[in-house]
Image: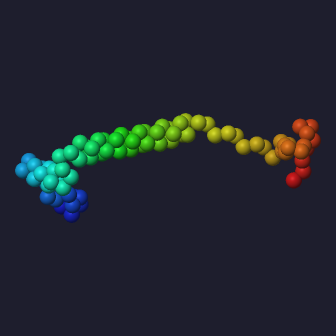
Amino acid sequence: MNALLPSFLAFGAPSTTELVLIFLVILLLFGARKLPELAKGIGQAMREFKKATREAEDSIRTAMDEKPEKPKAKDEPVQTRDSKPDEKQDL
């Protein structure tokens, strides 16, 4: 049963000490001035991703709600730019 679990769950959730250590490493790598900019960029990226997925879901839902057009019967005349509405075109 344990083989079915994703690998990140095998170690469990990170503890408070591990989270503080990770934050300190990030602070050392990027510096205190860059952290707000980094967080702002991550927030904007998440917002744009959520907006894109919402728009995609909406377009799929509207496409599913639309009724497809009925195909024309073979007996109906085919109209081209050069033909008049009264003329039948033989193909």
Residue 23 appears in the figure: yes
Q: Residue furthest left?
A: 17
Point out residue 66 in the picture as x, y percentages from the top left corner.
59, 36
Q: Position of residue 16 (x, y in %)?
A: 8, 47
In the picture, measured across the screen, residue 27 lies left or right of residue 57, that is left
State the image quarter where residue 40 is shown.
Answer: top left
Colour pattern? rainbow
Residue at 21% across, 45% down: 33
Residue 89, compared with residue 10, is above or below; it is above
Q: Quadrant of residue 88?
A: top right
Q: From what the image shows, is residue 40 above or below residue 10? A: above
Q: Residue 13, can we see it?
A: no
Name the foreground residue: 9 vs 76.
9
Tell me the residue at 90%/43% (across/down). 83
- Residue 32 spot, x, y in % from top left: 17, 46
**Residue 72 picture location, percent across and down:** 76, 43
Depth check: 8 or 25 in front?
25
Say left or right for 67 vs 18. Answer: right
Residue at point 31% right, 44% down? Answer: 41
Q: Residue furthest right?
A: 87
Q: Residue at x 10, y 49 (%)?
A: 20
Q: Quadrant of the N terminus?
A: bottom left
